[in-house]
Image (cartoon, helix red, strand yellow):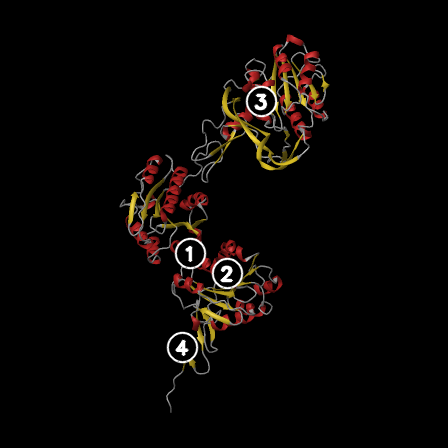
């Protein structure tokens, strides 16, 4: 049978490399242990007499980039060497096609000189002739070394892809008592590195890409022979599982393709199927054991309390990342305290709308608060109640003085589900939430109810909230943004509401809550009689979104006042394409009604005239006929985007001349000169950069209003007399002199005459 020559078809696939983040050696330990390995590598020192020679691969197979990393590894090792002619000597040989002596062991006597020379080493390129380099050392020994009088250590830094035989010369070197470390670079061939390295190979094969890990492995091995030491006696060498990877080219049968075969005898050409192969680059894994030195870390004792995170700063220092309300120093110790005597009842919503997750967040908040604030020296006592359709007092106020006991009771408190009857819960909390202890005089502690909810109430809350405050209880609210308005209505002030955006932000409210517990109310003008009219720009220059922000700002201001006919009366005028009195001074008798009416004020659009609106207020709002009270301070607050204020200076002055104070809040890039004229000669202009910033200026506005409310009042300004009557001051009061047949206290009636 004739013999045939079969031709094989071959296809080669080339891969461009691997992701730079890929680790070719992984020590399977926690991130914390890796940090300790890195830290320990900087604590090692090698002072013993030893000759260390670097044999660095400079061939094309590793490339210039890996050559630079090899140099970096060598410099890192030198940082721990006590380089001196009588102690540690260092030399370097670069090899590729041929070996090249970079500098002998006796060339330099200081660490700085050796590192500087290594930095200047130039990449040679060429073939990877590792065997020739080893034979070079067998012939010449360690150039400049002390021969066998001191230990000899050879650090071969290579990818292990020699183009010659290495086993024989490597074995001969080790037989001469040379300790050989094989340090891989790029994609090392681990089998060859194991052949090069001394036994046990696990302690003498390293990876230069992870410099600090490789340095630790090197010094850990050398510490067993007393060449290297570590500064801390508590450090120890331990084995860790690790995995080494490399990139290899593998040939695989891909299939068969048509080809031709010929006969040597006849010269005939016949068709046939020939094997078709492909070459692939694949990662191969090699399980191993890596020996590394670790030292006790400053965080091992878990010094950070109350959930703080310990962050090491070197071998013996650390700092704590502490939760809010805890000291950000060494151990997150509580930094808050209550300097007043206060009984605090936490009222937690436990309804279906709150959800179990929301209930757990509230419990976590109370636990964190107790840990931060309560102590043996604290004068504060805490109780906890939860509610849905009924109130349940889980921890009576003052029952637990020990924080761990309080925390255990909180953990055992169950979620209820059911309806969200916040109003009913407030009423019951005020009636029985603080027990029946009789306190008298100055011994009575301040009593605070902290309402925590993420759900809208399903019953009426205004009356119960008033009942709570009437019993001299301070009501504070903690909740999410969705219930802000309801909490503000219940507490009576935005200042008593703490709103959070997420679970972590909830804990940020602890310092704010602690500040509320002992703070005294700021002296204001809530009990001062006042007629207050807001003039709100609803023109197209403002826009509907910003108009809504202005409404929210007015509501936050209205919450600061006790609205009733004997104290504060409020009115609102909006303007744009027209002027509209949303409600007059005597329209609404309660704060709740005022807040509701403010929310319903219409956006008008169009162009507005501030001067026309001020005249409207003078003629039809700040009058006795429409509810203004003689002898009561009168204030107009103008909130505007600035357009249409050019004609407002004269009407504003007319109001001031008649005893009405005018304050201007200008928002955005306003026409400042026009607003200054509108505001008058006194400091009566507040400029706000953006509508979103209005809320930051509420306190400034409130101070100004309260200051004006305490000014002396002229009973005849504005004149309480109607129908062109004349107001005359007399003995701390006034009387109206009427004309044209008018009579009455304010000239409001016609004189009735009988016919003759």
Residue at coordinates 65% horizontally, 22% vertically from top-left?
A: 162
Q: CA distance from mark 2 to mark 4?
A: 41 Å
Asked whether disc 2 touches disc 3, contact meaning CB atoms under 8 Å apart, the reply is no
Quick one: quadrant of the N terminus? Answer: top right
Q: CA distance from mark 2 to mark 1?
A: 15 Å
Neighbourhood count class around disc 4 (C-alpha, 10 Å): few under 14, some 14–19, many 20 upward: some
Residue behind mark 2: 550
Mark nearer the viewer, 3 or 4: 3
Residue behind mark 4: 744
Quick one: quadrant of the C terminus? Answer: bottom left
Depicted 752 relative to depicted 9: above or below: below
User: Where does the image place residue 384, in percent across and percent down from the top left?
Assistant: 33, 44
Q: CA distance from mark 2 to mark 3?
A: 76 Å
Residue behind mark 3: 191
The quadrant in which residue 736 appears is bottom left
Residue behind mark 1: 485
Mark nearer the viewer, 2 or 3: 3
Mark nearer the viewer, 1 or 4: 1
Asked whether disc 2 touches disc 1, contact meaning CB atoms under 8 Å apart, the reply is no
| Tag 1 secondary structure | helix
**Quick one: label 2 or label 3, which is nearer the N terminus?**
3
Asked whether disc 2 touches disc 4, contact meaning CB atoms under 8 Å apart, the reply is no
**Quick one: label 1 or label 4, which is nearer the N terminus?**
1
**Quick one: label 3 or label 4, which is nearer the N terminus?**
3
Horizontal side, residue 594 vs residue 56: left or right: left
């Amino acid at each position: 049978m004739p013999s045939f020559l079969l031709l094989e078809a071959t296809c080669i696939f080339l891969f461009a490399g691997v992701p730079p983040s890929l680790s070719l050696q992984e020590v399977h330990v926690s991130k914390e242990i890796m940090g300790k390995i890195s830290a320990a590598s900087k604590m090692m020192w090698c002072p013993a007499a030893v000759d260390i020679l670097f044999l660095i691969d400079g061939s094309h197979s590793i490339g210039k980039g890996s050559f630079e990393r090899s140099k970096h590894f060598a410099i890192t090792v030198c940082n721990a060497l006590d380089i001196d002619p009588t102690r540690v000597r260092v030399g370097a040989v670069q090899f590729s096609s041929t070996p090249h002596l970079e500098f002998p062991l006796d060339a330099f006597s200081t660490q700085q000189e050796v590192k500087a020379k290594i930095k200047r080493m130039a990449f040679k390129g060429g073939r990877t002739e590792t065997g020739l380099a080893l034979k070079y050392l067998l012939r010449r020994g360690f150039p400049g070394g002390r021969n066998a009088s001191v230990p000899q250590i050879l650090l071969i830094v290579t990818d292990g892809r020699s183009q010659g035989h290495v086993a024989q010369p490597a074995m001969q070197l080790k037989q001469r008592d040379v300790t050989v470390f094989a340090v891989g670079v790029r994609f090392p061939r681990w089998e060859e590195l194991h052949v090069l390295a001394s036994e046990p190979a696990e302690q003498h094969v390293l990876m230069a890409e992870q410099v600090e890990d490789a340095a630790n492995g090197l010094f850990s091995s050398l510490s067993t022979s007393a060449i290297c030491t570590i500064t801390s006696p508590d450090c120890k060498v331990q084995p860790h599982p690790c995995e080494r990877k490399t990139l290899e080219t593998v040939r695989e049968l891909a299939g068969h393709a048509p080809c031709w075969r010929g006969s040597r005898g006849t010269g005939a050409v016949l068709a046939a199927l020939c094997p078709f192969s492909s070459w692939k680059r694949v990662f191969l894994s090699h399980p191993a054991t890596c020996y590394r030195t670790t030292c006790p870390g400053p965080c091992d004792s878990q010094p950070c309390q109350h959930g703080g995170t310990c962050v090491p700063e070197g071998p013996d220092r650390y700092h704590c990342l502490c939760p809010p309300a805890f000291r950000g120093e060494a151990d997150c110790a509580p930094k808050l305290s209550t300097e007043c005597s206060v009984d605090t009842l936490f009222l937690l919503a436990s309804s279906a709308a709150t959800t179990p997750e929301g209930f757990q967040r509230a419990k976590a908040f109370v636990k964190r608060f107790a840990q931060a604030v309560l102590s043996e020296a604290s004068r504060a006592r805490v109780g906890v109640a939860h509610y849905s359709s009924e109130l349940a007092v889980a921890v009576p106020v003052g029952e637990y003085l020990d924080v761990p006991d309080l925390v255990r009771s909180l953990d055992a408190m169950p979620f209820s589900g059911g309806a969200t009857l916040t109003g009913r819960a407030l009423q019951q909390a005020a009636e029985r939430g603080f027990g029946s202890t009789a306190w008298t005089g100055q011994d009575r502690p301040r009593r605070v109810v902290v309402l925590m909810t993420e759900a809208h109430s399903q019953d009426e809350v205004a009356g119960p909230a008033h009942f709570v405050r009437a019993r001299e209880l301070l009501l504070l609210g903690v909740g999410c943004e969705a219930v802000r308005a309801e909490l503000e209505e219940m507490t009576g002030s935005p200042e008593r509401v703490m709103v959070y955006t997420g679970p972590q932000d909830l804990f940020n409210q602890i310092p704010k809550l602690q500040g509320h517990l002992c703070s005294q109310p700021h002296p204001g003008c809530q009990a001062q009689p006042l007629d207050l009219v807001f003039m709100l720009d609803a023109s197209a220059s403002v826009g509907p979104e910003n108009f809504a922000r202005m409404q929210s700002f007015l509501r936050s201001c209205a919450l600061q006042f006790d609205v009733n006919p004997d104290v504060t009366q409020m009115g609102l005028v909006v303007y744009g394409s027209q002027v509209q009195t949303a409600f007059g001074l005597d329209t609404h008798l309660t704060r709740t009604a005022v807040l509701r009416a403010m929310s319903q004020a219409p956006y008008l659009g169009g162009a507005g005239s501030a001067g026309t609106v001020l005249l409207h207020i003078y003629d039809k709002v700040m009058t006795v006929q429409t509810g203004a009270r003689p002898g009561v301070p009168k204030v107009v607050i103008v909130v505007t985007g600035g357009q249409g204020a050019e004609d407002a200076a004269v009407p504003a002055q007319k109001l001031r001349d008649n005893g009405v104070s005018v304050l201007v809040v200008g928002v955005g890039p306003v026409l400042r000169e026009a607003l200054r004229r509108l505001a008058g000669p006194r400091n009566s202009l507040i400029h706000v950069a953006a509508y979103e910033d209005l809320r930051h200026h509420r306190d400034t506005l409130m101070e100004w209003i309260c200051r004006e409310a305490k000014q002396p009042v002229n009973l005849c300004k504005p004149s309480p007399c109607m129908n062109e009557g004349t107001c005359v001051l007399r003995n701390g009061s006034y009387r109206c002199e009427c004309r044209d047949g008018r009579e009455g206290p304010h000239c409001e009636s016609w004189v009735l005459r009988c016919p003759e």
